[in-house]
């Protein structure tokens, strides 16, 4: 029996003291909220704080989970060879606690954007959908299933 393989990832909607949202610019996906893969032996909160610090230079406090997302599609990575497995992503609301805006090997820019202007920056339909879930958050966790390739398709959307 082959064991299922999923990438586990975390994403952070980071607010500063003025309510602005932290965005980072990546080479392949453009503007997005920071986050990334959870490494072996790492818990979700530590992974999220690490990813945000690495990608943007900002230290955060993780506040609460706002969504769980399943990308059930598989596709070929940017190298043209590697198959990317399905993903499970956990999004959290975070608050800035220090640090200095910066960039990394993964990011080319980082900035604070007014909450109501963020969707003007994010082009990816999946990331736009997840950010909209944050805007619509009323205390219930959002759950969505989607595929991103060959084109974005939202398959399941509900609150739990």
Image (cartoon, rainbow, N blue to C red):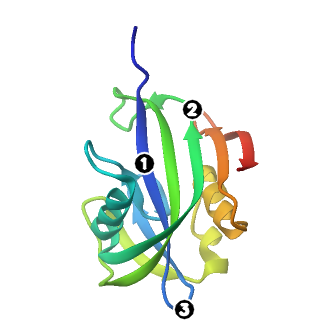
Label 1 crowd bin: few (<14), some (14–19), many (20+), radius 10 Å: many
Residue ID for mark 2 = 72
Q: Residue at x 69, y 66 (%)?
A: 139
Residue ID for mark 1 = 9
- Work out whether mark 2 precedes mark 3 in sequence or the reverse, and give the earlier one: 3
The CA distance from mark 2 to mark 3 is: 36 Å
Mark 3 lies on a secondary structure that is loop
Could you tell me how many numbered marks the image carries? 3
Give the quadrant of the N terminus: top left
Tell which of 50 and 82 is nearer to you: 50
Tell which of 123 and 43 is nearer to you: 43
On residue 65, the disc is none
Q: Residue at x 30, y 70 (%)?
A: 53
- Work out whether mark 2 precedes mark 1 in sequence or the reverse, and give the earlier one: 1
Q: Is residue 72 left or right of residue 83?
A: right
Residue ID for mark 3 = 18
Q: Are marks 2 and 3 in contact (CB under 8 Å)?
A: no
Q: Which residue is drawn at 50% across and 28% down?
A: 74
* Residue 137 pos. (x, y %): 69, 66
Extreme residue in the bottom direction: 18
């Amino acid at each position: 029996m082959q064991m299922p393989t999923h990438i586990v990832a975390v994403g952070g909607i980071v607010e500063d003291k003025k309510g602005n949202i932290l965005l980072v610019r990546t080479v392949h996906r453009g503007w997005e909220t920071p986050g990334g893969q959870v490494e072996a032996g790492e818990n979700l909160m530590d992974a999220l704080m690490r990813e945000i610090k690495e990608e943007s230079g900002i230290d955060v406090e993780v506040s609460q989970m706002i969504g769980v997302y399943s990308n059930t599609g598989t596709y070929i990575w940017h190298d043209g060879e590697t198959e990317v497995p399905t993903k499970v992503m956990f999004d959290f609301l975070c608050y800035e606690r220090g640090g200095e805006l910066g960039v990394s090997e993964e990011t080319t820019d980082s900035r604070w954007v007014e909450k109501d202007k963020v969707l003007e920056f994010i082009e990816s339909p999946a990331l736009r959908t997840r950010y909209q879930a944050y805007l619509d958050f009323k205390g219930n966790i959002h759950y969505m299933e989607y595929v991103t390739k060959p084109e974005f398709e939202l398959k399941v959307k509900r609150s739990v």
